[in-house]
């Protein structure tokens, strides 16, 4: 028995570590189970207007100065881009065709026995353009539709999006989501309680990721900083940790301010280098969901910091709070960045048991969902 072909729709082909690695983890895990899956190359052609709207013009201007700053480090950014591009081509099975519209996707439906959407924040309703494609809107009722760990991201669904999301989600045959608060939102919206499953990167264990990683060239102890947000207290927390330990700050920059922060900047890191930097760090300071869960999976001493202020309407801290709670690691979420860091090694005894249980339950959901669409060769 084997699956003819499974098509996966997710965000992945950007130079973003979390998006790239969750896509890789999901498609490779599914194929390791004996299936034939690929990521569908879907890149919607959104900017067709012959002129820029005012909001678009403002975004272009806002990005102009940061782009000029990044030019100072252009040679390193080019290395990063080459590493990502090689990773996409060599490590992620992808559709041979690139799709730019719903119409093109609809015509390809006969190629796949089933479709899967997930993971990442593809169901976030507060983004400017909620794309129905990532809810498998184009897939006819005769073809299977599975969601695996999509994230709603925010803590609410805007009123104007509720009707659309209710209709889209109701068409999914096997329904799962990544966070408890997302499951609650979906249940209140649709009357169905989704399975809450792990992010795909947690379907792979520590040994698998250690084999995947490329090791950094330096061997002395270091504190890894990986921040997606702008909040100053995050950097101040890392600096105090440096002072207490005497370890250098190794920074993976995502913001322009981090191009000038810390002792070592790993601008050129690709996905494999990213995992290697986490694997070999003495401590990790991060406000990233994937930075946090890779730290957990690799058994590292980490501090999960708040990316958003509590009163920020786009607050996404709930994602971190949820996974830390599920794995008995809530104490690693730092709400007071002015406090002294606990330098004792994390006791992972309970967390390892919880992670193994959650991994098995998530894999069981995935296997059961896929099993319906097996075909006799």
Image (cartoon, rainbow, N blue to C red):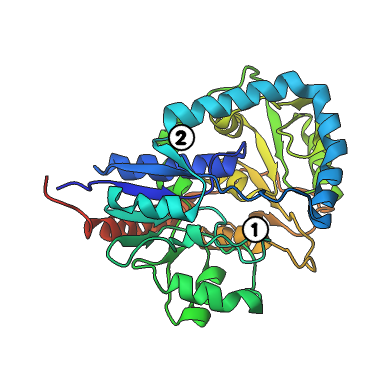
- Image position, residue 170 (x, y; %): 42, 74
x, y percent for residue 150: 50, 59
* Vertical arrangement, residue 264 with respect to residue 13, above or below: above
Check whether the beta carbons of the residues at disc 2 and disc 1 lie within 8 A of each other: no
Q: In the picture, residue 34 is in which quadrant?
A: top left
* Pick the front one: 109 or 355: 109
The residue that disc 2 covers is 209
Q: Given the current orientation, which residue lies at the most extreme left position?
A: 376
* Residue in view at x 76 percent, y 58 percent: 308
- Quadrant for the C terminus in the image: top left
Residue sitting at 50 percent across and 71 percent down? 183
Left or right: where 3 falls relative to 322? left
Up/down of 212 relative to 196, above or below: above
Residue 260, given in percent of the width and then of the height, sits at 85, 30
| Front residue of this view, candidates 312 and 248 | 312
Q: Which mark is residue 331?
A: 1
Where residue 238 sits, quadrant-wise, is top right
Q: Which residue is drawn at 29% across and 47% down?
A: 111
Q: Is residue 74 left or right of residue 362?
A: right
Residue lying furthest front: 50
- Mark 2–mark 1 distance (CA, rounded to whole Å): 25 Å
- In the image, is residue 305 above or below residue 143? above
> Could you say which is closer to the camera, residue 83 or residue 316?
83
Q: Does residue 211 show up?
A: no
Q: In which quarter of the image is residue 316?
A: bottom right
Instruction: Indicate the position of residue 132 as horizontal and vertical percent values.
Output: 51, 62
Q: What element carries label 2?
A: helix
- Other-residue count near label 1 (Cα within 10 Å), few / some / many at <14 / 14–19 / ≥20: some
315 w.r.t. 15: above or below: below
Q: Is mark 1 on a helix, strand or loop?
A: helix
Inspect this view and state whether residue 214 appears. yes
């Amino acid at each position: 028995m084997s699956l003819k072909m499974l098509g996966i729709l997710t965000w992945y082909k950007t130079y973003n570590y979390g998006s790239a690695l969750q896509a890789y983890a999901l498609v490779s895990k599914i194929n390791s189970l004996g299936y034939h899956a690929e990521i569908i190359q879907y890149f919607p052609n959104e900017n067709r207007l012959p002129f820029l709207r005012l909001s678009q013009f403002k975004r272009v201007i806002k990005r102009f100065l940061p782009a000029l700053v990044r030019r100072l480090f252009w040679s390193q950014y080019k290395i990063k881009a080459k590493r990502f591009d090689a990773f996409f081509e060599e490590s992620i099975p992808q559709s041979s065709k690139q799709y730019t519209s719903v119409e093109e996707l609809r015509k390809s439906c006969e190629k796949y026995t089933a479709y899967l959407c997930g993971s990442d924040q593809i169901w976030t309703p507060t983004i400017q353009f909620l794309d129905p494609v990532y809810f498998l809107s184009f897939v006819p009722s005769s073809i299977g539709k599975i969601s695996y760990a999509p994230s709603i991201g925010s803590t609410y669904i805007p009123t104007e999006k509720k009707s659309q999301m209710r209709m889209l989600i109701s068409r999914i045959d096997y329904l799962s989501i990544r966070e408890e608060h997302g499951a609650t939102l979906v249940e209140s919206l649709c009357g169905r309680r989704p399975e809450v499953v792990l992010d795909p990167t947690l379907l792979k264990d520590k040994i698998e990721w250690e084999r995947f990683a490329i090791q950094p060239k330096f061997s002395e102890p270091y504190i890894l900083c990986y921040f997606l947000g702008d909040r100053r207290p995050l950097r101040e927390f890392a600096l105090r940790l440096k002072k207490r330990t005497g370890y250098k700050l190794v920074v993976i920059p995502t913001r322009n301010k981090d191009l000038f922060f810390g002792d070592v900047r790993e601008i050129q890191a690709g996905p494999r280098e990213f995992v290697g930097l986490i694997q070999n760090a003495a401590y990790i300071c991060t406000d990233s969901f994937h930075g946090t869960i890779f730290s957990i999976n690799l058994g590292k001493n980490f501090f999960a910091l708040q990316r958003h202020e509590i009163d920020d309407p786009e607050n996404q801290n709930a994602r971190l709070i949820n996974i830390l709670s599920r794995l008995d690691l809530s104490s690693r979420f730092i709400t007071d960045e002015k406090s002294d860091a606990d330098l004792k090694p994390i006791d992972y005894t309970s967390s390892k048991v919880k992670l193994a249980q959650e991994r098995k339950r998530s894999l069981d959901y995935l296997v059961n969902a896929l099993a319906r669409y097996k075909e006799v060769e």
